[in-house]
């Protein structure tokens, strides 16, 4: 017997996928959201709104350790960096946050909750993300949006049409996952600096305590200096 599990990040693609699956009356046994603890407040509000809309509870999981602990204090148990404290900031080669928080915690939950069942997971990856689709190819994972030929923009517009707007998050960021992600574009990080200064400040505090700077090209301190100058120049031009 198979259990059908929606992997729900709360973003536009997984939201559109979930709503479309329910509209098409496809089997959904569980909807699983992994709370990293570094989500935007608007995301938590969005999830509550989705629950009310579909009249179903979303399973919310959390890792035993916080993002901050793993970033700064987790002691590596093996390998050449055995004994080193903290994973430091993730990058394209080492996205430990995805592995530790999402894959490990969700995997453990499904194994314990649905012991003895076959599991089919549904992930929200749009048709215009071929690299992600190929990278995440797995016989037990399905990608309904890609099967239905839905693009990222179409997924977002669909969500908007249903009344979901994340309180404007997608007008500020291309991706609305963790606010501390170094993989955000410079435009998005500048928006974080302007609109969420408390988060920008927190990243700066973390950077001062770890061995790797925020990004390979810029430290968060350098970005702060750059953004402050750019904003000042923009204001001068307007005046």
Image (cartoon, rainbow, N blue to C red):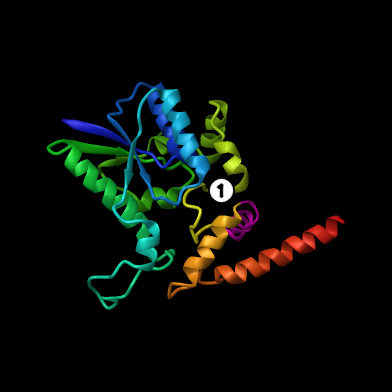
Q: Residue furthest left?
A: 116
Residue shown at the point (38%, 27%) measured from the top left: 21
Residue 132, percent from left and from top: 41, 51
> Can residue 149 be spotted in the picture?
no
Q: Is residue 32 above or below residue 211?
A: above
Residue 91, percent from left and from top: 44, 65
Quadrant location of the C terminus in the rendered image: bottom right
44 on left or right of 201: left
Residue shown at the point (37%, 51%) measured from the top left: 134
Q: Nearer the viewer, residue 158 or 36?
A: 36
Q: Is residue 193 covered in magenta?
A: yes
Q: Which residue is identified by label 1?
A: 174
- The residue segment tinted magenta is 185-195
Residue shown at the point (79%, 63%) measured from the top left: 233
Residue shown at the point (59%, 53%) measured from the top left: 196
Residue 46, percent from left and from top: 49, 35
* Number of numbered discs visible in the structure rendering: 1
Residue 189, percent from left and from top: 59, 58
> Can residue 182 be spotted in the picture?
yes
């Amino acid at each position: 017997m198979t259990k059908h599990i929606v992997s729900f990040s709360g973003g536009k693609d997984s939201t559109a996928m979930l709503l479309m699956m329910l509209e098409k009356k496809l089997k959904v046994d569980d909807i699983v959201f992994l709370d990293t603890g570094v989500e935007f407040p608007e995301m938590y509000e969005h999830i509550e709104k989705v629950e009310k809309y579909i009249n179903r509870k979303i399973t919310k999981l959390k890792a035993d350790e916080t993002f901050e602990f793993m970033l700064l204090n987790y002691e590596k148990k093996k390998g050449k960096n055995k004994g080193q404290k903290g994973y430091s900031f993730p990058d394209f080669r080492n996205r430990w946050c995805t592995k530790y928080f999402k894959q490990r915690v969700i995997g453990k939950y499904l194994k314990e909750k649905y012991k003895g069942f076959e599991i089919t997971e549904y992930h929200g990856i749009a048709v215009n993300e071929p690299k992600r689709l190929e990278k995440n190819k797995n016989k037990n994972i399905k990608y309904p949006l890609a099967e239905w030929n839905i693009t990222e923009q179409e997924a977002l517009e669909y969500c908007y049409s249903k009344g979901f707007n994340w309180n404007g998050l997608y007008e500020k960021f291309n991706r609305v996952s963790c606010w501390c992600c170094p993989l955000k574009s410079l435009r998005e990080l500048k928006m974080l600096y302007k609109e969420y200064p408390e988060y920008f400040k927190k990243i700066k505090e973390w950077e001062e305590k770890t061995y790797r700077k925020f990004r390979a090209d810029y430290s968060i301190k350098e970005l702060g200096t750059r953004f402050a100058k750019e904003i000042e120049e923009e204001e001068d031009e307007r005046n």
